[in-house]
Amino acid sequence: MLLGYAVKRAEEHQINNFWRRRRMWTRILARATRAVAVAGNYSLINQPISDPIFLKIPKSTFPQIFNNPRFLVTSNLDNELSPDSSVNGGDRQLAEQEEGGGGGDTYEVDSDTLESVLRLLQTSADGSLESCLDDMDLTLHQQLVTKITETPFVLSENLIRFFWWAWSERSLEVTTPMVESLVLAICGNDDVRKKKEVVYSLWDLVKEIGEKESGLLNVRILNELISSFSRLRKGKAALEVFDKFEAFHCVPDADTYYFTIEALCRRRAFDWACGVCQKMVDARTLPDAEKVGAILSWLCKGKKAKEAHGVYVVATEKGKLPPVNVVSFLVLKLCGEDETVKSALEILEDIPEEKRERAIKPFLAVVRALCRIKEVDKAKELLLKMIENGPPPGNAVFNFVVTAYSKAGEMGKAVEMMRLMESRGLRPDVYTYTVLASAYSNGGEMEEAQKILAEAKKKHVKLGPVMFHTLIRGYCKLEQFDEALKLLAEMKDYGVRPSVDEYDKLIQSLCLKALDWKMAEKLQEEMKESGLHLKGITRGLIRAVKEMEKEVVEAESITAVV
């Protein structure tokens, strides 16, 4: 408790020192200005203290200025600046002109009154604030309120309460600059960003003023509130401010839409964000390219790639092309849905040629997506464009097209793409040969499959088991078990260890189609030696075929005896 009291007293002492130094320098500037006027026969009228006239006079007059007794005297300093001092009338007039803009009735901000109010607002944080203000019997003026709102070290909570008290209890005539000054002072405070209650209280005050004072609020005031709610991750509150624009006779600008979308996306309210995006697109009021890129990224992360594409189209029409990395991200997300793949293909045309060298990912994604939706010819067309204009396609791009043609049964085009790959200095990998061999095998073209296998052996030292598995399965379908067994032995000689699947498929085919349980048992023994275990259902199949053959032999023996 003692520590808290000490801290509080230290803060009060710091604030009092601040205002004491400020009054001292104000008096020094006022005295210097009057001394200059005496030495150089200048007039004080229409000469603000912030622009002292002694900066504009010749240096030759400086000795007269500093030798002037009024510049050096300190005993009557307080009297010179007192409200009753006739000598200081010029200074008061300067202050009035600086605050009021000159001409007509002017209002002088009393320094003692200002200091008293600030001391109260800087130290009080309890429920007695309004009663203390009532006891002070203040004469409120717009300039006084503006001075208070622009002063640092004032508690934001008290500043809002003071403004509300002055407007509602004392019927202060509020102006747009006053409200704007209040909002900027509070929303620009770093501490406020950690106190959501302060921003909510400020919004309640601004909303009340906007509902009762028609046309007083402007876009900047509302944008600051939306931005503050965005930093606090209060998307619903930001949307509430956005929805009040029409009621307050304000037209949203680019920052309005950006801050609102940002706030909603931070709270993952992507459906609401899409609604705001649609209004932004309809109004064709978009922020700069960097902010457009941020909006596209948020929507894509929220699985709203289709809506992001709508924003992208309008942005490109207005010449606000997002960064290439954002465009690539949008393309990747559009490729995730079959209905938006063609939109992704169109966006690739917007990537500048000088930046395509490092944009292989979006092109690869589009080729893959086109093959997935069975638009293989368009994928091939895009691949040829990549060869011509970049980025240069690699093995992965070719493999997608080769695989798609192989699955479609268009083996001529598939082989053609492989030959094109070779002509560009790329070596088809094991995957390429496996896809082609599998397609030939499924179609019963085992001779072509063997040619692909032979070519793969020449190009690669080691092949995977999948290549042999597809061919063994193809021979089993055609009941060419000798070729299948030969391929199994070749597989071992080539250093590829057969898996359980190869043995299982071959044993089942031998039992069901050839009824050759002897060879099946032999393969089972090989599996045991290799540390592999045959499935129980397949072992049962071997026993069943073996018993069935014995029963047939016994039946034939009995028939022969009879």
Image (cartoon, grey):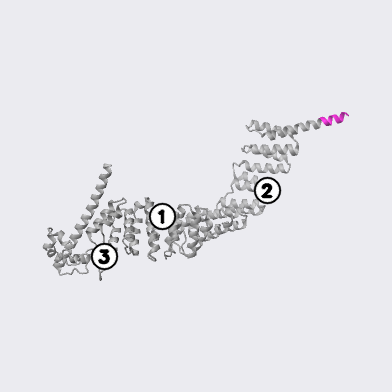
Count residues near mark 3 (Cα–Cα under 10 Å), then give few for <14, some for 14-19, many for 20+.
some
Count residues near mark 2 (Cα–Cα under 10 Å), then give few for <14, some for 14-19, many for 20+.
many
Residue 58, horizontal then vertical, whole percent = 17, 67
Residue 505, horizontal then vertical, whole percent = 68, 39
Marks 1 and 3, the one that precedes in the sequence: 3
Residue 279 or residue 431, whichever sits in front: 279
Count residues near mark 1 (Cα–Cα under 10 Å), then give few for <14, some for 14-19, many for 20+.
many
Judged from the image, the secondary structure of the residue bearing numbered disc 3 is helix
Q: Is 363 left or right of 53, judged from the image as shown?
A: right
Judged from the image, the secondary structure of the residue bearing numbered disc 1 is helix
Report if the CB atoms under discs 1 and 2 are less than 8 Å apart: no
Query: Which stretch did the figure color magenta?
Result: 554-562
Q: Residue at x 78, y 30 (%)?
A: 550
Report if the CB atoms under discs 1 and 3 are less than 8 Å apart: no
Q: Which mark is residue 229?
A: 1
Residue 332, horizontal then vertical, whole percent = 53, 54
Residue 180, horizontal then vertical, whole percent = 35, 61
Q: Give the amino acid at mark 3.
A: Glu
In the picture as drawn, the residue positioned furthest to the right comes out as 562
Residue 77 or residue 111, whichever sits in front: 111
State the quadrant of the N terminus: top left
Q: Give the amino acid at mark 2.
A: Tyr
Q: Residue at x 37, y 51 (%)?
A: 195
Judged from the image, the secondary structure of the residue bearing numbered disc 2 is helix
Q: Give the amino acid at mark 1.
A: Phe
Residue at label 2?
440
Q: Is 136 left or right of 474, judged from the image as shown?
A: left
Instruction: Give the CA distance from mark 3 to mark 2.
Output: 91 Å
Marks 3 and 2, the one that precedes in the sequence: 3
Residue at label 3?
99
Q: Is 503 left or right of 329, judged from the image as shown?
A: right
